Image (spheres, rainbow, N blue to C red):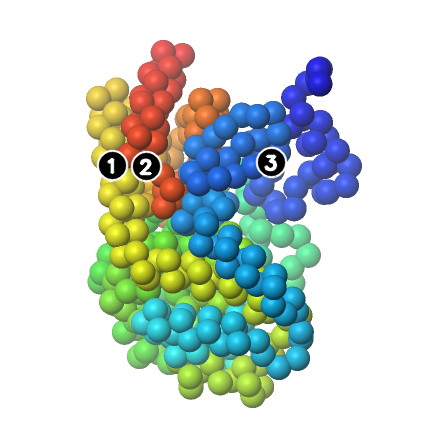
Amino acid sequence: MELDRPLGHAIDEAARRVLPGGVNSATRQVGAPYAFTAADGAYVSDADGHRYLDYHAAFGAVLLGHNHPAVRQAVLTALDGVDLMGLGVTPIEVELAELACELIPSAEMMITTMSGSEATVQAVRLARAVTGRSLLVKFQGCYHGWGDALARNVISKPESAYGRDPLSAGLLDSAVDATLIAEFNDLDSVRALFESHPEQIAAVFLEPIPHNVGALVPTQEFVEGLRELTRQQGALLVFDEVITGFRHALGGYQQVCGVQPDLTAFGKAMANGFPTAGLAGPRELMERFAADVLLAGTFNGHPVAAHAAIATMRHLRDNPDFYLRTHRLGQRLRDGLGEITAELDVDATVSGFGGVFVLYFGTGPVSGYRDLMRNDHAAYAAFHRRMTGKGFLMLPMALKRNHVSGAHTDADIDLTLEAARDVLKEMRAD
Ligand code: PMP
C-alpha cells in the first residue's frame, strides 16, 4: 500500500477525533505521534514498521521484557478459569496476596486494586481513618497518581500536562490545601511541618527514590529519620513503591534501605504490564478495610492480572540473577554516559539506581529537588528527539527516568552508548 504520509500520523489523526488529545493518559501525548503495534522482549515496533529499543517500558511497568513467556502463559491459563465473579474470592487472589506478603518486608496483608493511583487513594483514606487527622505531607516533585489529595507540586517547570499545579482543574481547594510540601532529602523541612501543624498530619508519602523526577537517591539518614519522626509524631509513613517496587529488589526499596514503612503502594512492574496494583501493610491497619474504610472495585483482584502478577513475582523470586544482571546493565549505561559526557565536555549529570538510568543536562550533584532546576529541558528534548530518530525509545520528559528490562542485552547497551555518543556529538556541532 502506498501511503502519502506515515500510517502513525493517520492513526494519530483518527485518535484525535475520538480520544481527547488522541491518547488515554495525559503524559502519552508528549513527543507524539506514536502508534505502536507490536512489542517483544526489549523491542517495540510502530505502525510504520520502525523498530525501537525500549527503555520507556510503559513508564516502568514492563520489567521482565515485553510479552514475557512466563507471564504470557499465566495469562492464557487465566483465560481457562473464572473470568470474573464479583462474589467471594478466587483462589488466585489469595495466592497473590500470600506471595506479596512473603516477599515484601512490611506486608502482612495486601489489598489489590487496578492502578497505582487507586492504591494511593486508599492509603490516604486509611491513614486519615487510622489517625483521625486530615493533613498529608508529600515531597516536591513526587507523583502519587491522579487522586485529588496528592495532585500538587509534582513538577513546577512547564512541560506537558505536568506544567499545571495542581495537576488538574476541577479539584477542591480544600483537597489540595490539605497536602503540605516538604523537600526531598531534607528532614528539617518535614520536622518544620510537624512543628507548625502539631497532631494534624496523618501521613507522610514518599517515593523512596523519586523516579518521577528522574532519580534522586535518598540518604540513609533521611529515610531512617523519616521513620523515627513519623513514629514520634503519630503519623503514618507511606512508601509509594509503584515504580521502585519489584524493580529495584524483590522486596522493593524498603528491602534495600532496611526501613519499614507503615503502608506501601505497589503497581507498575508488579504484573509486568498487566493492570494491577496493591496496598500492603500490617494486619492491624489493613483490617480497617474490613471494618469502616471502604474497599470496593468491580475489577479488583482480576484473575488475568492476578495470574500475571504471580508469574512475574515468581520469575523474580526464582531467578535471583535477574537483579544482578539488570543492575549491571544499568551501571554500564550510567558509567558509559558519564564517560561520554565527560569526554565531550557536555554539562550533564548521570543518575539512577539498579536498572534505571537518567541523563540530566546540568551540573551535579543532584540530590534534591532544587538541583533539578538547573536542568536544561531543551537540551534533553534535543537528545531525546535524536535518540528516537536512531531507534532508542526513552521517556520524552526531561525529568524522568529510563528502564533496563530483563530482555536487554550487553549488545543493546553497546548500541545505546554508541548512539548516545553520536547524538551528543551532533548536538555539540549544531
Ligand atoms: N505512584 C507513582 C510513584 C507513580 O509513578 C505512579 C504512575 N506514574 C502512580 C503512583 C500512579 O499509578 P497508576 O498510573 O497505575 O495509577
Residue at x 24%, y 57% (from the top left corner): 219
Of the numbered discs 3 and 2, the one sitting upstream in the chain is 3
Q: Quadrant of the N terminus?
A: top right
Q: Which residue is mark 3?
A: 37
Badge 1: how crowded within 10 Å, few (<14), some, or many (20+)?
some
Q: Secondary structure at mark 1?
A: helix
Q: Which mark is residue 371?
A: none
Q: Which residue is mark 1?
A: 332
Q: Is residue 364 above or below residue 96?
A: above
Q: Amino acid at mark 3?
A: Thr
Q: CA distance from mark 1 to mark 2?
A: 11 Å
Q: Position of residue 75 (x, y in %)?
A: 54, 58
Observer able to see residue 65: yes
Of the numbered discs 1 and 2, the one sitting upstream in the chain is 1
Q: Which mark is residue 409?
A: 2
Left/right of residue 201 with respect to residue 187 in the rendered view: right
Q: Position of residue 117 (x, y in %)?
A: 55, 61
Observer able to see residue 124: no
Badge 2: how crowded within 10 Å, few (<14), some, or many (20+)?
some
